[in-house]
Amino acid sequence: MEILLKVGSLICLSVLSAVLYRAGGMGKEETAEPKWIPMFLRHSWIRDWLCPLLVYGSLCIFWLPLSVLGWLLLAVSYALLGGALTTYWDELFGFDNFWFSGFMCGVAAVPLCFCGFPFYIVLVRAIVLAVLWGAWCAIFNKDTTEEYGRGAFLVITVPLLLI
């Protein structure tokens, strides 16, 4: 029963992350889709700082740091993910590179290696995020679909860290 609650929570947090990710990428025009997302959520900081909260909040469903160092490293990972979400690396590549952006979002969890998470697992998740983000955006060309997917992938891949 406990595992069902954890899986259900992970799915709910993934959906919420998808919505907040989209909300943070929306314009302030009344015609922006979907219209049901309120204007007060249409700010980039919603994506940059609430999605990481859901990512590491979902990690805490499965793993709680027991030490001050663990909590500090979780906070550092949160800040790194927030920073990674502020760019699609177009200044480096000349275009929005979702492959690299997804990879860097995964790399943001590297500080967790100092509290017991194997580096190779963090790297595997980073590669999975790169492939999911890059392929998703290569397949779909509508900004709403792309953003919902990228936001959901951030959270739904968290259990990979626990392998």
Image: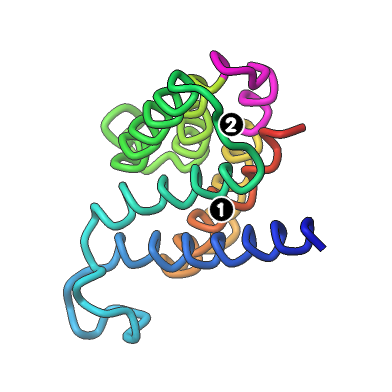
Up the image or down, 69 lies above or below 45; here it is: above
Up the image or down, 106 lies above or below 13; here it is: above
Picture quadrant of residue 14: bottom right
* Bounds of the magenta segment: 113-125
**From this viewpoint, is residue 141 visible?**
no
* Residue 62: image location, x then y, percent: 66, 43
Could you tell me which secondary element the residue under label 1 belongs to?
A: helix
Q: What is the count of numbered marks?
A: 2
Residue 126, numbered label: 2
Quadrant where the image shows the N terminus:
bottom right
Quadrant where the image shows the C terminus:
top right
Q: Write down the residue under mark 1.
A: 138
Label 2: how many residues lie within 10 Å, few (<14), some (14-19) or many (20+)? many
Left or right side of 122 for 79: left
- The image's colour scheme reads rainbow
Q: Report, in whole angstroms, how far the alpha carbon at label 1 lies from the one at label 2.
A: 18 Å
Picture quadrant of residue 126: top right
Task: Please report the residue visible at 62 percent of the width from the left and 43 percent of the height from the top.
Answer: 158
